[in-house]
């Protein structure tokens, strides 16, 4: 039987030869939104790849050749091409890791109800790796973690096992933080440069060689894991903070009678202004979590990140502001919110994806329920299903006919052409709260809608 190459013992020409001849075996643990496209990219490059996940339903789906990520264009085709040949999936980590040269971790890194980062998935898999890793194999962390987590916590979890493996000696470890945007992962995998940091230079170089084979993007070597993770968090905290800034301006401009969209469109003509848009809150598995990871890191260092904490407070207050706009519109209409039917248009945390992780829509819905409002939901990605205990609508017109007020929460493509005349003709009563400023305010006024736009003064 041919001896399998031990990846961290190969010299550079051997490594390149092994990669190019598909002799390096890959295991990806966590094949969700990011891990599955990653696994498919590796398999599509000719490297035998196995996905591991604790979600047995997901594994069954994959192995029966049903592609689970319908909102990720392009990957359905690759899935069809590589599954069963170069790519398989299993729940049995113990069957895969001992036979893998490279183990990639794409596990969730959420936060708990107190906004404290929860690294339990990575730490529990880390423990398992300590028992299962092949000597001289390579672990790559793609999950978003705070700087220092790999060096201080994950390595310890792997090392503190019966096998007593030592990082840098018995196994190598590095990071390649994932930065793709859901809904456009293929596009981002082809365009966004990636950061690579390793426990030592050889590890960084090895990861660079492997990723160069799989992805066409630029790879940027970092001095270590924590710096690569710091870059990843910095870009997302930057966004979270800038959104908080425009959200704060939006509330001010509403009072002054200035349209935030007019301001932003003009402001972005200045070369050093990078535009961000106001909205009903900041959700998803990345931005809020990454800000709290940075806050947590600072706390552990005895520091307070005042701007980041303030940004979080502002962004987390936006659902309440949306309710204030709704209340104001009801007051103008002389109607009571109690027992009214309010339609939420869009529940995804961002446009054009089927994803409701940490979505502001959920907070808005909870607040409305406390006010004894009957909440209806229409979202093209969640038709005729139950979300947040509500049976969602399948038909927009029928939903509008039952509706006293709508709140546009997610700017899905389908909502960009909403015509005020159409809304007026269909809605039971004509109240429109536009938290993304995509409905024409003047036209809304002209046809007699009671319109409130987040960041828009009344006209
Ligand atoms: N989704 C994004 O927008 C995005 C973008 C960039 C980076 N990230 C980061 O990538 C990482 C993964 O995120 P995601 O969005 O793909 O998450 P996800 O929830 O879609 O996928 C994670 C997968 O891991 C599996 N899993 C959980 N615990 C496990 C365990 N112990 N063993 C095996 N499998 C397990 C889950 O069943 C799930 O399928 C996170 O750190 C996230 O912050 C996400």
Image: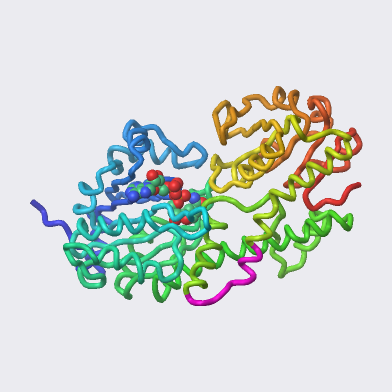
Q: Is residue 68 left or right of residue 273?
A: left
Measured as percent of width and height from the top left, residue 371 is found at 71, 38
Residue reaching furthest to the left: 1
Q: Quadrant of residue 451?
A: top right
Residue 387 position in % (x across, y down):
56, 34
Q: What segment is highlighted magenta in the picture?
A: 301-311
Is 15 rendered above or below residue 68?
Answer: below
Q: Nearer the viewer, residue 65 or 408?
A: 408
The residue located at (24%, 67%) in the rendering is 13
In front of the other: 113 or 218: 113
Query: Quick check: can you spot residue 45?
Result: no
Residue visible at 8% across and 51% down in the picture: 1
Q: Position of residue 445 (x, y in %)?
A: 89, 39
Q: Please provide percent x and percent y for residue 341.
A: 73, 30
Note whether 2 is above or below 195 in the view shown.
above
Residue 411, image quadrant: top right
- The residue depicted at 18 percent of the width and 60 percent of the height is 5
């Amino acid at each position: 039987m041919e001896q399998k190459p031990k990846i961290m013992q190969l010299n550079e020409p051997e490594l390149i030869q092994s990669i190019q001849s598909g002799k390096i075996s890959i295991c990806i643990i966590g094949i969700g939104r990011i891990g599955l496209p990653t696994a498919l990219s590796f398999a599509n490059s000719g490297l035998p790849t196995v996905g591991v996940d604790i979600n047995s339903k997901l594994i069954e789906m994959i192995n029966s050749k049903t592609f689970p990520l319908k909102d990720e264009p392009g990957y359905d085709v690759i899935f069809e091409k590589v599954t069963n040949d170069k790519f398989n999936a299993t729940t049995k980590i113990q069957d895969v890791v001992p036979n893998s040269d490279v183990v990639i971790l794409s596990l969730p890194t959420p936060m708990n109800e107190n906004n404290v980062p929860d690294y339990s998935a990575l730490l529990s898999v880390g423990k398992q790796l300590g028992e299962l890793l092949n000597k001289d194999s390579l672990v790559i962390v793609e999950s978003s973690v705070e700087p220092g987590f790999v060096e201080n916590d994950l390595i310890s979890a792997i090392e503190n096992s019966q096998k007593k493996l030592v990082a840098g000696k018995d196994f190598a470890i590095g990071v390649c933080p994932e930065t793709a945007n859901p809904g456009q992962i293929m596009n981002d995998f082809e365009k966004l440069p990636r950061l690579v940091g390793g426990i030592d230079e050889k590890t960084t170089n090895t990861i660079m060689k492997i990723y160069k084979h799989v992805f066409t993007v630029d790879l940027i070597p970092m001095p270590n894991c924590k710096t690569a993770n710091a870059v990843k968090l910095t870009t997302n905290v930057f966004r979270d903070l800038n959104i908080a800034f425009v959200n704060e301006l939006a509330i001010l401009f509403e009072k002054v009678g200035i349209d935030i969209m007019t301001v932003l469109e003009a402001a972005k003509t200045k070369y050093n202004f990078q535009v961000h848009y106001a909205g009903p809150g900041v959700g998803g598995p990345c931005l809020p979590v990454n800000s709290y990871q940075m806050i947590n890191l600072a706390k552990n260092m005895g520091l307070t990140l005042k701007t980041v904490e303030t940004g979080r407070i502002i962004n987390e207050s936006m659902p309440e502001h949306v309710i204030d706009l709704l209340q104001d519109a009801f007051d103008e209409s002389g109607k009571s919110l109690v027992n009214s039917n309010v339609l939420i248009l869009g529940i995804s945390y961002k446009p054009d994806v089927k994803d409701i992780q940490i979505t502001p829509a959920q907070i808005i819905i909870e607040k409305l329920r406390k006010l004894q409002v009957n909440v209806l939901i229409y979202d093209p990605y969640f038709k005729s299903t139950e979300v947040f205990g509500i049976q969602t609508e399948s038909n927009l017109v029928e939903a509008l006919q039952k509706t006293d007020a709508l709140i546009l929460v997610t700017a899905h493509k389908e909502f960009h052409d909403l015509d005020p005349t159409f809304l007026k003709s269909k809605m039971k009563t004509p109240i429109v709260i536009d938290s993304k400023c995509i409905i024409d305010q003047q036209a809304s006024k002209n046809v007699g809608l009671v319109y409130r736009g987040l960041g828009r003064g009344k006209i």
